[in-house]
Image (spheres, rainbow, N blue to C red):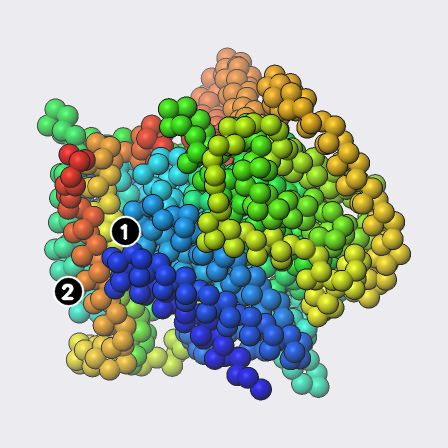
Amino acid sequence: MFDLSILIYSLLGLHILGLFLFPFIGKSKKLYLYSSTLLSTLSLFAAAILFYVVYKGDSAPVELVKWQWLSAGSFSISMGIMVDFLGASMALVVAIVACMVQWFSLSYMADDPARSRYFAFLNFFVLAMLSLVFSSNLLQTFIFWELVGFASWLLIGFWHHKPSAANAAKKAFIVNRIGDVGFVIALMVVLAMIGTFNYFEIIENVSNTRVFSGAWLLPVQEGPYPKFQIVDASVLHLAGFGLLLAVMGKSAQFPLAIWLPDAMEGPTPVSALIHAATMVAAGVFLVLRYFFLFTPEVLDVMAVIGALTAFMGAYAAFSQFDIKKILAYSTISQLGYMVLALGVGAWSAGYFHLVTHAFFKAGLFLGAGVIIHFVAHNTDKADQIDPQDIRNMGGLRKALPILHIFFLLCTLSLMGVPGFSGFLSKEAILTGVMTRAGEGSWAWMAIAFLAFLTVLMTVLYMARLYSYVFLGSEYRWAKINHSLSLKLGVPVAILGLLSVGFWFSFSIDFSHSWFLHRLGEPLLLMSNLPGNLTVSEFTSIGKSYHTYITFLSIGLVLIALIASARIFRNPRHDIARQSNHWFAKLSANNWYADMLNHYLIVLPTLKISQLAQWFDAKVIDRLVDLFGVFVVVVSTIGYWFDRTFVDGSVNFVARLSAGIGGVAGSSKNASVQGYVIVAVTLFLIFLVWIVFVL
Amino acid sequence: MMISILFYLFASLAIIGSLFILLTEKIVYAAFSLLLILLSIAAIFVLAGSEFLAVTQIMVYAGGILILLIFGVLMTSKLRDGEILVPKSNKFWSIFLGGSFFVLLFFMISQVNFALLSWMQGADKAVGEGMITKLGTLLMSDYVLAFELAGIILLVALVAAALLAGERIKEGTK
Amino acid sequence: MMIGLDHFLLLAAALFSLGLAIVIARRNAVMVLMGIELMLNASNINLVAFGYHDPNLMQGQLFALFVIVIAAAEAAIGLAIVMKVYRYYYTVDLQELSKEHKIV
């Protein structure tokens, strides 16, 4: 058999080569750009061969390479390369999108003076992302997780001379740091409780343990009379919530999603590569890989967060006029779908959606890049119009006919129209959600309702985008004879074709998809799926819901298409144009995330602290004074006591709450030291928990 | 006995010095107080049997880093009435977090009985002769890779610092 | 006569906490760098104190040596950045830098 490690080495080596060519031939831009693109095309072939070999091979994950990184006493940390179908297919997705983006950027960035640096950054990002996919060790995953975040910082802030881009890069980086605190906590829990970071050793150690009525039994001694150490099972929840926090940061989930819309300040191909297809998928990939570390309670929270994110993202996409912002909110919404799928236990559906979404969203972003390019180059500079504003487009169906076809393919796929890949994966997710909701309470029905509502809204906002950009009768472009250049067109075309459903399944029934069959079932070690279902029960219940979900979602898509055909035929009917309407205002401001922070967290804590101080000054001091009138000596002591302890504690509580509110709530006023305070406080809480609770 | 007295003397010097840094308004005083702390820590290294490290500490910290810091202070301060005053903020948080960190560490250290640790009992107590020779041998044999890497890191850091701090005048900007 | 290991550890804990307090409380970036140096030194005391009981391999001392090297590099880079920031904004006050100039 083909030696897989050679393939992976060459896959990584090509990008390392691409990165290290930069200092040597980066000066001669043309040579470097073309060699880098060629290398990434070669790496696409390597990834395709790897995928094929793994697809043909047996399904169990294998660790190809493992070497000792550091050791201290009996404890050691290894590094390694592992590969399974999950990793190989993810690598293929990353390689395809990265290759398309590089070809696209050859033409798109042709006028940028720093384009060599840009290509070096792209190589660095792909290198970090592929290493993350292949790493066999949780700590190694964390290292590449950080490198991916760093690459994203470099690329969002690529035009760092624009203050908005520099700020967006910083915002993305810092919001991700909050998630990383969770990752570090999870790392500590895993090391302390399971004793290893290695994927296979974690599985081996964990499969020897049992969770038994709220307690977790860890084997201490093996043999005929095994000894167990009993640990409170809440430590498992802690690890899961830590990882969930990290995922919320990286994959832009509800409270930490604020960085993704800002990240659109980067070049458009970067948005396609990082903020649609690969980097934001790293969070979802982490959950996919270490699914067995998540307890059902954590998964429940994950499902709620995912559903909220899906709904809120779709809603916020309604009233944006910036084409990239619409796609950004749509990305948040689709990522919410993936996280929701994982949260309800539909493991394979979540991954399926990741793959299909990567292709059609990257295609949409690259298409948007072409459109922005076209608008910017074909209008008078004197007009001073914003080339990203969809109100300045319109009628592009005639001007860019070929792009229009492939953009439409991606759009239909995102809408979930039958026959496209997005339909299959969305169907799989909805079936998973209904499986869970059918077993659960009304709260689960509400989550399922949100999921179905988002289907409707997705169609609406994408139809709005489409009709603004391509329909309409603006003949501004009529005179211009614009032929789409091959380098810009081919990547969009390939991604558009990849979002057609028959790549994944020949029928419209997702359960016949070869992809899902090959992916198999999630590895569960400690507990069942949420709702105490086994994997086979989950699948069989899903089958019973399957038929009517298909009809329901096709019906929803049809209704939304008809509705949008009526609404958006005339742009004046677009509710977003009535800027005073509450619906438009709420959506355009992304749910007033910043204001909510201010009113819900900062002001109440300030009020509470004021109240505490008033109480302290008026009531406690008065009482002490009265007391002092009666017994002078005692009152002196009492006064002293009051001054130091009572005041002290009241002030302490007041300032504590004011401080927490001030630091946590001020996304705008936060400072370096504020972040230090938050980080150290979280760390302290964790230490106290470790020392006193465990 | 004598060693204990010396230890406590230098320990209290170091702690008083760092309290002074925390509290003082004058940044130049803080820099010189840092010198005091670094020298006392060097003395404590001697008491812990690592003379070489103590000398390194004096040379690198007191001789190098501190001079850098003082230069930094002088070059980044607005002079107001001849004195360089620096404000404080987050007073509550610094006291709360620093205090609770110390209390927690104190608690954890007091929980551990170090005499029971196995490697502690097995350790050879012969300290003193030939330590520096041994250190040099180890640096050139077992730790040679780390040693070389440290050298490279220092070189890179120096080049980067010079590049960062140096003024580059571009055409068109100034 | 030997001084107990816990004495060293307590001294290091106190210095580390004070360094942390300095990092949080002082607004001048140079002072924050001083606080970081103090914290690094405190951890060095720990390493040396443990290394005292390991005279054969001397891992503690060697590790402390490398920490000093890294600290030197960190101080050089940190001060260079501070100088750059000062030349650009004419202040090294962290609060001012975050509130008024919005650089983090």
Residues at marks 1 and 2 touching, judged by CB atoms closer than 8 Å: no
Q: Which residue is mark 2?
A: B55
Q: Which residue is mark 1?
A: C38
Q: What's the residue at 54%, 51% (across, down)? A: A492
Q: Secondary structure at mark 1?
A: helix
Report x, y in % for residue B37.
21, 51
Q: Is residue A70 above or below residue A635?
A: below
Residue B51 visible somewhere in the drawing: yes
Q: What's the residue at 72%, 32% (across, down)? A: A564
Letter of the chain that mark 2 sits on in the rendering: B
Q: Amino acid at mark 2?
A: Val
Count of marks placed on residues: 2
Report x, y in % for residue B52.
17, 69
Q: Quadrant of residue A636?
A: top left
Q: Quadrant of residue A18?
A: bottom left
Q: Which image quarter is the C terminus of chain B in? A: top left
Q: Quadrant of residue A194?
A: bottom right
Letter of the chain that mark 1 sits on in the rendering: C
Report x, y in % for residue C78.
25, 48
Q: What's the residue at 84%, 49% (across, down)? A: A549
Q: Is residue A206 above or below residue A623?
A: below
Report x, y in % for residue C25.
33, 37
Q: Secondary structure at mark 2?
A: helix
Residue A183 visible somewhere in the drawing: no
- Please state which of residues A19 and A61 is positioned toward the viewer in this rendering: A19
